[in-house]
Image (cartoon, helix red, strand yellow):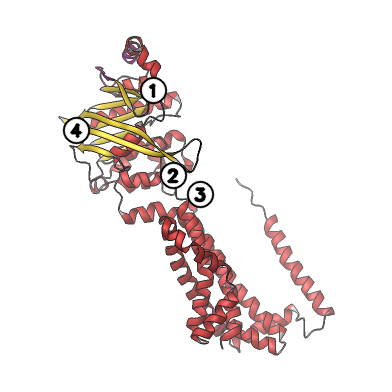
Amino acid sequence: MIDISIKNLNKSFLQPDSENKHKYNILQIIKDLNLNIKQNEVVSFVGPSGIGKSTLLNILSGYDKQYKGDISINREINNKKLSFIFQAHNLLPWLTSIENVKLISNEESLKNDSPSKILNELGLGDFLNSYPNNLSGGMKRRVSIARAFVNEPNILLMDEPFVSLEKPLANELREKTIELINKNNVTAILVTHDLREAIMFSDRIIFCNEKPMKILLDKEINIKKSFSYDSDEVDEVYKNITMNYPNILKAM
Amino acid sequence: MKKISYLPSLIRFSSFLSIFIIWTILSIFVDHRLFASPIDVVKDINYHLFEGELISDTIITLTRAGTSFFIAMFLGSIIGYLLARYKNLDYFFDSWVIIGLNIPAIVLVILFYIWLGLTELALVSAVVLNKMPIVIVNIREGTRSLDKSYFHISSVYQLTKLQTFTKIILPQLYPYIMTSARTGLSLIWKIVLVFELLGRSSGIGFQIQVFFQFFDISSLLAYSFFFIFIILIIENYIMIPIENRATHWRKQ
């Protein structure tokens, strides 16, 4: 069953001219993008910076409404059932960990005390009343993951969620996030530069480059979403892709 | 355990003591009628408090300052926010704000006393119009510097307008509101005294004019010091605690 359908998506920005700063040129960042994502499928977008991957997430999340084309999402996304893990943790610094999570919780989550439960599950039981200023980078990231899952979302968008974290911590959080994705039967889109991370998370990887965004390869990944970042299974798929599609990886 | 240093308090106390000593010494050498000693001033404060009208005059002046302060803060905050949000409105009213910032307070009050008579309404209107442009400029600047990434959270998690205002916009505006409030308070009470002196028949400013006509320096200082004392209490026990409460997360 198709969960997210994108038809003829077009998105452009106004960009100042390189020679005349008073003149603006239209920069087409996404052109006639068509894509279907099945229910409970995790799809990764891998490609270089600035080709519109994050813009696509902003459009899907409803934040960016200036686009042309059709986007339909079949599952319930009101009642805060669409979630986003941002590249920066985006925690409100004037709210404590628990307040940050409670702020976006729906009535059902609040009734079930889900904010405390999920923060405890992510190892932040002793830091419920700590402000983000007093948390380490990893802890902030845990709070942002807790926030993303507190309402048991149907759709999850992730914009390079583990970038700038140390490798062991990033691996631990990747595994925890996959566990939560599997538990909640989430349909998810991950934007990343890290091919291993994409393999670990995804049922499908979409390799893209250029402006406007061009899909170079739409590759199905047939391994269980439970292997660690450095596991042999992930390694094997990684080698398979790098050996079979060297031109695509070079083009990114 | 953190060691408490009494040195800053000691230096502050020495500073006050030195003013008192210099003042006492000068009052011995200078003509006593024109340079009242600290002891005379204390005696006069006592006299005006218990036998004069210091309390009622203080209440009248504080009511005028308070009314003007709240109206200027309320209207200035709304207008400043709207100017930052709507560019065309800002283009239209920007020159009005600049004119408002540069009209001398004395011109405003004379105009209002002529137009509306020597009334409370004229005084409060003149103070509000004098103070409001500073609040507008501060809040406009604060609204312009709101961190837009937080609005992404509001959009993705479908926060209500009230939640967005109280949890995302207002906490970012607090420093600007507090700066406006504190500078506003210090500016308004001084202007109110001048305006009372020019056209009212009650309040601290009016009494200062009476003391001036009789060259009663001691009573003039008694009224001034008592009013400054009241303003310091407001600053220390109302303004600073509110500011600390609003920004306590930064100090955690």
Question: Is residue A106 left or right of B195 when viewed as pictured?
Answer: left
Under tag 3, what secondary structure? helix
Q: Quadrant of residue B54?
A: bottom right
Picture disc at residue A3: 4
- Of marks 4 and 1, which one's residue comes earlier in the chain? 4
Task: Report if the CB atoms under discs 3 and 4 are less than 8 Å apart.
Answer: no
Task: Report if the CB atoms under discs 2 and 4 are less than 8 Å apart.
Answer: no
Residue A234 highlighted magenta (yes or no): yes
- Of marks 2 and 4, which one's residue comes earlier in the chain? 4
Q: Amino acid at mark 3?
A: Arg
Disc 3 to disc 2, how far (Cα)? 12 Å
Residue A244 makes an appearance in the image: yes
Q: Amino acid at mark 2?
A: Ser
Q: Is residue B80 above or below residue B4?
A: below
Q: Which residues are magenta?
A: A217-237
Q: Is residue B156 above or below residue A205?
A: below
Chain bearing tag 3 is: B
Query: Residue at left 50%, top 49%?
Result: B250
- Residue B219 lies, in percent from the top left, at 68, 84
Q: Which residue is mark 1?
A: A194
What residue occupies the far left of the structure in this picture? A1
Q: Which residue is mark 2?
A: A130
Under tag 1, what secondary structure? loop
